[in-house]
Image (spheres, grey):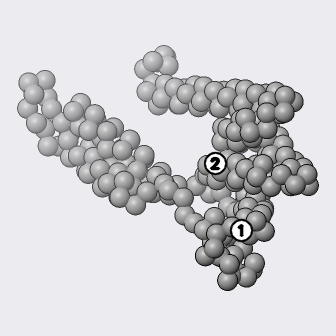
């Protein structure tokens, strides 16, 4: 019976699962730490620092992250309470931090986020209410809101699809070259076309994917 060390597929799967668990554990730990720091700053009336750490807690994202959801609720509450008290600067900062945190947690198949859209609506609304730029003097409130929403909806780089193509292409490229070095040469160092043909094609495909991702991401 072969041991696990003799089964590269099983060994690779175990390594990937272990790495994934380690990354998720680190993300959860950092999100929890930033959330605790934000609560501490908020209790000490250091609202600016609290907003910053709530934003960081959101950015440490993973599926069903309870710390991120709590940070979103806290930022929303800060924004609404600050505006009710007349402190629009803090309210705007909270909404912007909420939008920035959610905007940084994009996935390949993530659709429109209602919380993110709501935060953008509030940013546009508050900015228009307290407009100060002379160039905006002749524009209606509706026009300004539409302009701000258009700017806030602008594309954010890198594009997740092209970014994924870049990373997968690089992995394929490097992996194929390593495989070619193993199969494409004999013990004397002579090149073997039959063994190198498949890995070489894989390396070319990987390089092209990497280059396209690098160009369009």
The reply to whether residue 17 is visible in this rendering is no
Q: What element carries label 2?
A: loop
Instruction: Estimate the x, y position of residue 47 in percent, counting from the top left.
Output: 79, 38
Image quarter of residue 19: top right
Instruction: Estimate the x, y position of residue 194 in percent, counting from the top left.
Output: 17, 43
Q: Judge the density around disc 1: few (<14), some (14-19), many (≥20) Cα neighbours within 10 Å.
A: some
Question: What's the CA distance linking mark 2 and mark 1?
Answer: 30 Å
Q: Is residue 216 left or right of residue 113?
A: left
Instruction: Kindly report which numbered mark, 2 or 1, lies closer to the viewer in this rendering.
Output: 1
Q: In this view, does 213 lie above or below 197?
A: below
Q: Residue at x 73, y 58 (%)?
A: 116
Q: Is residue 173 above or below residue 119?
A: above
Q: Is residue 214 left or right of residue 14?
A: left
Q: Which residue is drawn at 65% across and 57% down?
A: 110
Q: In this view, does 160 lie above or below 22?
A: below
Q: Judge the density around disc 2: few (<14), some (14-19), many (≥20) Cα neighbours within 10 Å.
A: few
Q: How many callouts does the rendering have?
A: 2
Q: Quadrant of the C terminus?
A: bottom left
Q: Is mark 1 on a helix, strand or loop?
A: loop
Instruction: Estimate the x, y position of residue 200 in percent, counting from the top left.
Output: 23, 46
Mark 2 touching mark 1, by CB under 8 A? no
Instruction: Estimate the x, y position of residue 135 in percent, counting from the top left.
Output: 61, 76
Circle number at residue 11: none
Task: Give whichever of 176, 143 is nearer the camera.
Answer: 143
The reply to whether residue 87 is visible in this rendering is yes
Residue at which label 1 appears: 131
Q: Residue at x 65, y 32 (%)?
A: 27
Task: Give whichever of 35, 167 is nearer the camera.
Answer: 35
Image quarter of residue 170: top left
Q: Is residue 46 above or below residue 118?
A: above
Residue at which label 2 appears: 105
Q: Which residue is drawn at 70% across and 48% down?
A: 97
């Amino acid at each position: 019976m072969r041991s696990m060390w003799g089964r590269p597929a099983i060994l690779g799967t175990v390594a990937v699962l272990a790495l994934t668990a380690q990354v998720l554990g680190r993300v959860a730990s950092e999100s929890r730490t930033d959330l605790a720091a934000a609560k501490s700053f908020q209790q000490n009336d250091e609202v600016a620092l609290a907003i910053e750490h709530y934003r960081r807690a959101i950015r440490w994202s993973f599926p069903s992250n309870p710390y991120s959801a709590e940070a979103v609720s806290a930022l929303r509450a800060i924004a609404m309470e600050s505006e009710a008290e007349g402190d629009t600067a803090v309210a705007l900062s909270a909404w912007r931090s909420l939008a920035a945190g959610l905007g940084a947690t994009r996935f390949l198949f993530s659709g429109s986020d209602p919380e993110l859209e709501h935060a953008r609506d509030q940013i546009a609304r508050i900015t228009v209410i307290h407009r100060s730029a002379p160039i905006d003097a002749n524009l209606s409130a509706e026009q300004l809101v539409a302009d701000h929403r258009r700017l806030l909806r602008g594309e954010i780089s890198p594009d997740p699809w092209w970014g994924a193509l870049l990373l997968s292409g690089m992995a394929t490229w490097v992996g194929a070259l390593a495989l070619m070095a193993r199969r494409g040469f004999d013990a004397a160092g002579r090149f073997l076309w039959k063994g190198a043909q498949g890995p070489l094609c894989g390396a070319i495909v990987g390089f092209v994917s990497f280059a396209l991702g690098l160009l369009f991401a």
